[in-house]
Image (cartoon, rainbow, N blue to C red):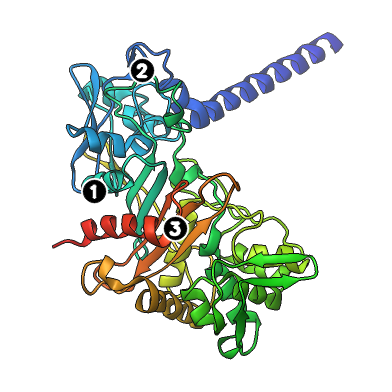
Amino acid sequence: MKSASNRIKIMWIFIALSLAGAAFLLFSIITQGGTWATSTRNSHLYINGTLIGAGNITDADGEILCATADGKRTFHEDSEVRSSLLHVVGDNHGFISSSVQNQYRTNLSGYNRIMGVWELSNFEQGSEVNLTLKAKACKTAYEALDGRKGAVCVYNYKTGQMLVSVSTPTYDPENVPENVNDSEYYDGVYINRVTMGLYPPGSTFKVITAAAAIDNVKGIDSKDFYCDGAYHTSYGDVKCMSEHGSLKMKEALAKSCNSAFAEIANDVGASKLQKTAENFGYNQKITLGKLGVYTSEIKTVKDDPLELGWAGIGQSTTLVTPLEQMRIMGAIAGDGVPIEPYLVQKVTTAAGFVNETGSAKKGARAVSPETAAQLKSLLRNNFEAQYGDWHFNEGLNPCGKSGTAETDPNKTPHAWFAGFLDNEEYPYAFAVIVEEGGSGSEVALPVAAQVVNALTDK
């Protein structure tokens, strides 16, 4: 009797282990099946590491950016379009790990959890991935950067659709340079600087400081500041590029006065300045579909008046991606609430079924509608008083802020420009960085204008 009881126990243990194994296998298939099915070891999917039979990647207008023809993965016919979109579309060797070709390879193969790669087997074509980007505008951004390292991004701050995403240096994926891994010119070529480039924001951060002041310092609009070329503390000075004399915050932002904004940062205080930056997205995880996005950082700001002064003008330990700069401008334009950017409009199977779509999603409120309106007025004044609307097509009502971000005393500063159009027909927010470009208003602003004008030409 005891022997039978033991056998029953063993049988139940065996059944339990079998059920647990089956459950684990099912869980693994659900969570890892796409990765297994699209592994480069599968010879029916890959030739020499290239995903064959993969679906098309197209831009917002249906232009084919990448396709499979005669067992070979090919790219857009224009070499400059190919180069401009390398970091988004990807290459045939997997060097651009954060690209659509790599991160959406399960979709491109036509894999699904129920039918596996049945779609590819029956239609000889995987799913099509339709992007929100405009290929011609991306080419314009590539040309505007003119061989300089940097990044350009533009999105619709009402719908969230990315329109431009260009990172340089880059190369033509159909004609990979032999010295791509050896030449200093190609340093960082495999990194998408739009989403993964972390830079000091320079004077573009004064927009955050202004927002913190509006919300926390009573009467900040009417307060007088005096600039004699520096903001003086017992620990040292925060240097300014000019001696601006007496001015209020509105003028200080337009003239990008370091002295005034170092003082404003001290009026705000360290904790409130950091809190405002975090409300706008610093230290918060930002996504762009399956593509990797680095988190913009603001480390704990000290109440030391000198360090706080530097933090207030974007020259402390703060680091930001171009994508985040664009998103901040979108939040201001959107009455204080950002619409999260997205890149993939839809994924369509070879059988014609749409199984994934992009849509507008609201982020957390950054500032109140009233504060956003004041910031919008300040950024519009920057153009009216300083930059000039003539950079842009007529009637676009550009708003924005330049930045000149220092990184090394022996190197030219990075040139920044971030802004948006206060325009119902073209609700676009944008950011540009030109590494070691110098003046933001002289170098990055013209790049931004050239790209935005290409998007708004009629």
Does residue 392 sit above or below 145 in this rendering? below
Characterize the local packing of mark 3: few (<14), some (14-19) or many (20 or more) Cα atoms within 10 angstroms: many
Which comes before the other along the chain, label 2 or label 3? 2
In percent of the image, x 76 and y 71: which residue is there? 233
Q: Is residue 163 visible?
A: yes
Residue 434, x across and y down, in percent:
42, 49
Residue 441, x across and y down, in percent:
40, 62
Pointers 1 and 3 in contact (CB under 8 A)? no
Mark 1 element type: loop
Q: Nearer the viewer, mark 1 or mark 3?
A: 3
In percent of the image, x 27 and y 73: which residue is there? 424
Q: Nearer the viewer, mark 2 or mark 3?
A: 3
Amino acid type indicated by mark 3: Ser
Amino acid type indicated by mark 2: Glu
From the viewer's perspective, is 239 left or right of 178?
right
Characterize the local packing of mark 1: few (<14), some (14-19) or many (20 or more) Cα atoms within 10 angstroms: some
Examine the image and state in which quarter residue 55 appears. top left
Label for residue 60? 1
From the viewer's perspective, is 72 left or right of 298?
left
In percent of the image, x 55 and y 59: which residue is there? 202
Q: Is residue 365 visible?
A: no
Q: Which residue is mark 2?
A: 178
Distance Cα–Cα, label 1 vs label 3: 33 Å
Q: Which residue is mark 3?
A: 439
Q: Classify the position of the C terminus by image quarter.
A: bottom left
185 or 57, which lies in front? 185
Distance Cα–Cα, label 2 vs label 3: 34 Å
Label for residue 46? none
Mark 2 element type: loop
Amino acid type indicated by mark 1: Ala
From the viewer's perspective, is 398 left or right of 272?
left
Examine the image and state in which quarter residue 230 appears. bottom right
